[in-house]
Image (spheres, rainbow, N blue to C red):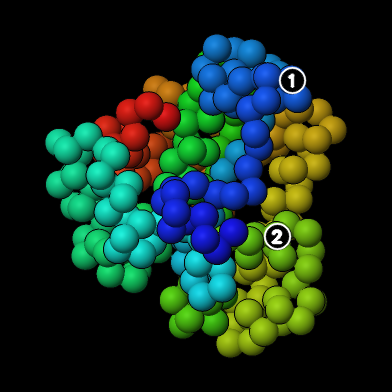
Amino acid sequence: QVRTPDANPGTFCLAPVIDGAFLPEHPLDAFRGGRAHRVPLIIGTNDREGAIFRGRANVLPRSPWRIQALFDHAPEDSHDEMRAAYPGLPIKRAAADFGGDYAFWYPSIVVAGLHSRFAPVHFYRFDIAPRVMHLLGLDATHGIEMYALFDQVDSPFARTMTALGGREPFNRAGERMRRHWLHFACTGIVEGNWPRYTESDRLTLIIDVVDRVEADPRGERRRVWQRFLPGL
């Protein structure tokens, strides 16, 4: 797990293997061709997925070498646009966001768009983060939504995370998420003002202190990734 990101930047050692039997084709090909199960889908990511992947968890393409390796395989005419999308790349914050968007956000956007051609999709972005997470430079990073969604705000980590404030808004965000998820699990339909995601408008529920819906959030960044990874 530690060696793979350097030996093959952008690759993860723990991943499905297309063997022609259990997994007969690449999942994106199945979504693109409408061969994925045509069921309603909730999908989304956190605001800054890549911020937490450092130290022993440094498995994303966020080092200068790993980032350059991805640039080497991308169309040259997309390089300047990508650097403009992440000002200061490869400095730490820009590199963390680049790596997180590569691994989590952009693939989720692709899946949501493809699946929306055949079945209802609802996309979210989890933005709310307690003050401690902002002070640490992590913000709404990978995994913290689980503490809200699964009502784990009394766990030791969540208590530490909310020690300087933000506990109640974080807890209320989790309550709203549970209502959405449980209603969806029971009926296949989301409750409230959460519109369907389509490739034409990309309406996204932003989960924050006050939830809101945005059309194609970070749309310019999405278009840059389309040019940077045209084969995805």
**Depth check: 226 or 154 in front?**
226
The kind of secondary structure element at disc 2 is: helix
Which element carries disc 1, helix, strand or loop?
A: loop
Q: Residue at image x 55%, y 63%?
A: 2
The residue furthest right is 186
Q: Nearer the viewer, residue 90 or 121?
A: 90
Q: Position of residue 103 (x, y in %)?
A: 48, 48
Q: Amino acid at mark 1?
A: Ala
Is the residue 84 above or below the residue 93 in the image? above
Could you tell me how far apart the alpha carbons at marks 2 and 1 are, in whole angstroms?
33 Å
Query: Is residue 162 visible in the rendered structure shown here?
Result: yes
Q: Residues within 10 Å of mark 2 (few under 14, many from 20)?
A: few
So how many labels did they put on this image? Answer: 2
Residue occupied by mark 1: 21
Residue 115 visible (yes or no) = no
Answer above or below: position of 34 versus 93: above
Q: Residue at x 49, y 71 (%)?
A: 54
Name the amino acid type tagged 2: Met
Counting residues from the start of the chain, the first of labels 2 and 1 encountered is 1
Measured from the top left, where is residue 231 in percent x and y? Answer: 37, 27
The foreground one among 142 and 28 is: 28
In the picture of the structure, the residue carrying the numbered disc 2 is 146
The answer to which quarter of the image holds residue 187 is: top right
Label 1 near label 2: C-beta < 8 Å? no
- Where residue 67 sits, quadrant-wise, is bottom left
